[in-house]
Amino acid sequence: MNEDKLAKEEVNSSWGGRFSEPTDAFVQRFTASHTVDRRLYNEDITGSLAHAAMLTRVDILTEKELVDIQDGLQSVKEDIEQGKFEWKVALEDVHMNIEAALTHKIGIAGKKLHTGRSRNDQVATDIRLHLRSAIDDISIELTNLQSGLLSLAKGETETIMPGFTHMQVAQPVSFGHHLMAWFEMLDRDFDRLQDCRKRLNICPLGAAALAGTTYPIDRDFTAKMLGFDRATRNSLDSVSDRDFAIEFCSAASLILMHLSRFSEELILWTSAQFNFIDLPDRFCTGSSIMPQKKNPDVPELVRGKTGRVYGNLTSLLTLMKSQPLAYNKDNQEDKEPLFDTIDTLKDCLRAFSDMVPAIKANKKEMYESTLKGYATATDLADYLVKKNMPFRDAHEVVGKAVALGIKQGIDLSKIALEDLQQFSMLISNDVYEILTLEGSLNARNHLGGTAPEQVKIQIEEAEKRLVAERR
């Protein structure tokens, strides 16, 4: 029997009874998905084992048939994992390839496995199982990155750097405080992933093609066996819903947006113009022509991959926007953007988890850069307001003092007292306590403030949350 004839018979054995001629060879290749969805083999086998157990429970399969199916599926899984499995384009997808291989191994019992289900609810179940596992893995990587941030922030609570608005020096902040801002972004990301996981963790198996099945199945049994919170409530929605994939890609886009913002800062800070930090050589590359170069390739790539994930989200939204109920072949296109998003996000988080704890702060350069921007100007205004000067008047006084500092080429803290007093006699010798960078930082000693004491509290509370909530 040649391969073309075998392929035709295999197609006919699964769905081809109504057809009078074989599928065109190009159409076979065009409509097949096994090159992509074979990634779901483990979830497909797991779902089939649960389905077989349920069919046995309701007396559709015998105990002997269940054992044969269990043994056969285990053998198929081993063949796949050992690279001995022959994937056939004529069998279209992971489901039919595995079912055909099972039937070849155990005979008629393999043909009974598909009773009470369809590839429509089968693939919906497989994707949910796969994504649930992926979210658990990604959550671990996210937690690792947050732990790395905490470790770095602990040693940098006293490190002073310029805080920016409009990319202009605004006020002094603790480098540890800046790192904790990144931590907070990732904390929201973690919560969004858990919300997504909650909504996807319902089981569509048993919805069959679109309307349910006439067999006396027990959907609650399979849902529980597969670790779902419950079974889905509507068969039409069960097979056609891809909200969970879109929601995940949306959450992933937010995470990558945050990582891209981190990347942008790291790229700027490693430049000679800033020189705020050093990245270890193992996370950088050189130039083929300029021997002095040390390029921050890891954050640059993460910044670039963000657009890729945004594109995957747009692809899924566009894929679903015009589909009538219930399942349509369009949905076959859901896997590539979803799988690519999973892989890209995992890799980016792993890269950052390894890189962030190894960042070295150039404290002297950070400090000197903060001095260049008259970062304590707001502190001088606050000083005058506390001496009963209206804020707008204080703003004008400080503006004149800054202009004088620019003219003299010195920081506010270096301007002579008599020079400051020409703008207001409310200024006295105690002003220098608040005009230093250290004084500015320590003055912001309140919840959420940048004072080192507060940053230490932020870090301690964050560590407790990670231990208590994610163990």
Image: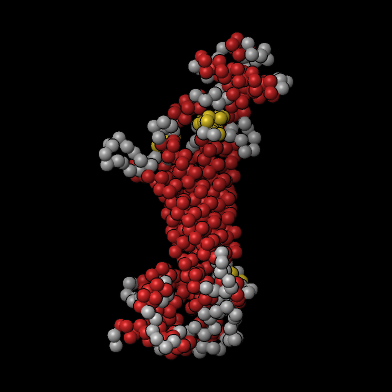
On the question of residue 444 being in view, the answer is yes
Residue 260 image offset from top left, x and y in percent: 47, 46
Quadrant assignment for the N terminus: bottom left
Q: Looking at the image, which residue is at 59% across and 44% down? A: 461
Residue 79 image offset from top left, x and y in percent: 35, 76
Q: Is residue 98 left or right of residue 220?
A: left
Q: Is residue 300 left or right of residue 320?
A: left
Q: Looking at the image, which residue is at 26% across and 39% down? A: 289
Residue 243 image offset from top left, x and y in percent: 57, 64
Q: Quadrant of residue 183?
A: top right
On the question of residue 72 being in view, the answer is no
Q: Quadrant of residue 380?
A: top right
The residue closer to the viewer here, 311 or 163, is 311
Q: Quadrant of residue 241?
A: bottom right
Q: Looking at the image, which residue is at 33% across and 76% down? A: 86
Residue 426 image offset from top left, x and y in percent: 68, 15
Q: Looking at the image, which residue is at 60% across and 80% down? A: 211
Quadrant assignment for the C terminus: bottom right
The residue closer to the viewer here, 311 or 303, is 311
In the rendered view, would you say 426 is above or below 149?
Answer: above
